Image (cartoon, rainbow, N blue to C red):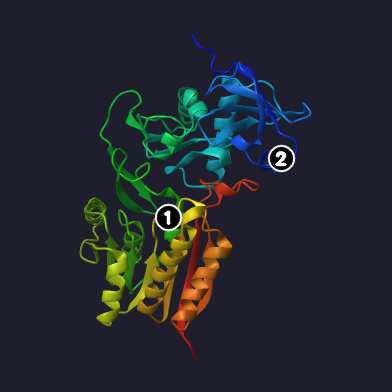
């Protein structure tokens, strides 16, 4: 039987390189490495040394990836099953103290010091997304440790589904895959979040089936929605729209370009008894907003929760145009004194750039913004300082006023 925890050799950094891991990050890039010993195996563990032989830690290597080493430990020279179990327990214990764990992200990759793997818990189902070769080899040990730890907290898991079907796996030289780990089960799962119920399609829904990172942002918008007319753009399966309806909005219109998402959102409205007040349509938001403006429509609350407009630095200029356009259009549809909730989930759209883009949009349409809140992702998606990729969600709530 293969020893998954055997250290197969060393990687030596070039002089002056390794800035990311020296500042607290977990990645070593291909252009930072001077020597890779012949004994290393892609996906296997390696010792990382600085140019002068100083021990930097243990990680797993993949020479097919731009991120050639992902670090697991900086101190110990031994990584084993007990080490992995301790990492998983720390992740679970943290969530037990910080979030509602009925449905939440249990493992968040680098931010939980388990780089390349995400595990979401939807009620009593786990959904696994593995995007790095080395962590993929340790995946079953991580799942076993997580199930055991949750059992100790009185939360037994009845099924596990893998959603390792993201394109990023191709960059690691890995095939995309999805399927059951262990016995099969009905992949349409009902969860409850903030008293709202949802059907979650863990097999065919986006990502792992549901966006848990907005949990408390959805709750923050609720207080603005009572007796209001609400527009929820890029609604996906209706989460913000349903929270608005639950809060007592007079009417809610949710919009998404995906027919599947709109169908699922409509089912979710029925599940919560909100079909009369919360409606969904399948439209392109960029086309719909100018049309609503031409018709003279106005809303008390407009919510903008778009997908990431950029997943690389090379496309950031076009992303800025997209964010500016939807915010500009959204502000024009808000009644004087109404509210705008707007966000970006792109890591490359950093907080400063996103803030500046919103400000430019407001200036272009002669609106004054009164900031109510600035928020990020829920604590089950922890932000690890010195690991900038862990901060990706920026979320503003504004009151929108005409220039006075």
Q: Is residue 91 left or right of residue 259?
A: right
Q: State which quadrant residue 356 falls in.
A: bottom right
Residue 346 appears in view: no
Q: Is residue 313 left or right of residue 127?
A: right
Q: Who is closer to the viewer here, 350 or 80?
A: 350
Distance in Å between CA atoms under marks 1 and 2? 29 Å
Evaluate if marks 1 and 2 touch, with contact meaning CB atoms under 8 Å apart.
no
Q: Residue at x 31, y 51 (%)?
A: 197
In the structure shown, which secondary structural element does the residue marked by tag 1 occupy? loop
Query: Where is 181 relative to 323, above or below?
Result: above
Expressed as whole percent of the image width and height from the top left, the position of residue 366 reads 46, 84
Expressed as whole percent of the image width and height from the top left, the position of residue 43 reads 52, 24
Q: Who is closer to the viewer here, 117 or 43?
A: 43
Q: Circle 1 is placed at which residue position?
A: 308
Q: Who is closer to the viewer here, 228 or 263?
A: 263
Q: Residue at x 42, y 29 (%)?
A: 174
Q: Residue at x 28, y 27 (%)?
A: 184
Q: Circle 2 is placed at which residue position?
A: 22
Find residue 126 and name its label. none
Expressed as whole percent of the image width and height from the top left, the position of residue 318 reads 44, 62
In the structure shown, which secondary structural element does the residue marked by tag 2 occupy? helix
Tell me how many marks there are: 2
Expressed as whole percent of the image width and height from the top left, the position of residue 119 reads 45, 36
Query: Where is 16 relative to 194, above or below?
Result: above
Residue 90 appears in view: yes
């Amino acid at each position: 039987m293969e020893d998954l925890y055997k250290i197969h050799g060393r990687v030596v950094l070039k002089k002056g390189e390794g800035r990311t891991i020296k500042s607290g990050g977990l990645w070593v890039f291909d252009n930072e490495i001077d020597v890779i010993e012949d004994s290393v195996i892609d996906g296997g563990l390696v010792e990382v040394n600085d140019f002068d032989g100083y021990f930097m830690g243990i990680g797993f290597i993949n020479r097919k990836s731009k991120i050639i080493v992902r670090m697991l430990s900086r101190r110990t020279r031994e990584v084993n099953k007990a080490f992995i179990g301790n990492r998983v327990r720390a992740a679970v214990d943290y969530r037990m103290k910080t979030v509602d764990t009925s449905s939440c992200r249990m493992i968040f990759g680098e931010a939980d010091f388990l780089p390349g793997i995400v595990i979401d818990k939807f009620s009593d189902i786990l959904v696994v997304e593995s995007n790095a070769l080395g962590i993929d080899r340790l995946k079953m040990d991580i799942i076993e440790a997580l199930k055991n730890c949750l059992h100790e907290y009185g939360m037994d898991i009845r099924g596990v589904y893998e959603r390792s079907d993201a394109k990023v796996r191709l960059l690691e030289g890995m095939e995309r895959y999805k399927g059951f780990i262990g016995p099969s089960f009905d992949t349409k799962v009902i969860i409850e979040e903030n008293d709202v119920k949802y059907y979650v399609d863990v097999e065919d829904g986006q990502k792992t089936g549901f966006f848990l990172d907005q949990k408390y942002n959805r709750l923050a918008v609720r207080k603005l929605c009572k007796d209001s007319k609400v527009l929820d753009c890029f609604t996906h399966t209706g989460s913000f729209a349903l929270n608005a309806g639950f809060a007592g909005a007079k009417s809610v219109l949710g919009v998404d370009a995906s027919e599947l998402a709109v169908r699922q959102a409509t089912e979710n409205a029925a599940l919560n008894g909100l079909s009369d007040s919360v409606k969904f349509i399948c439209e392109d938001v960029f086309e719909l907003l100018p049309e609503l403006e031409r018709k003279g429509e106005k809303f008390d609350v407009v919510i903008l929760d778009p997908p990431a407009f950029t997943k690389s630095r090379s496309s950031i200029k076009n992303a800025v145009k997209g964010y500016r356009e939807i915010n500009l259009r959204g502000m024009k549809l808000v009644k004087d004194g109404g509210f705008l909730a707007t966000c970006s989930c792109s890591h490359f759209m950093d907080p400063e750039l996103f803030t500046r883009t919103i400000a430019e949009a407001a200036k272009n349409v002669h609106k004054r913004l009164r900031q109510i809140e600035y928020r990020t992702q829920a604590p089950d998606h922890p932000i690890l300082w010195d690991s900038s990729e862990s901060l990706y969600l920026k979320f503003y709530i504004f009151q929108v006023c005409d220039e006075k």
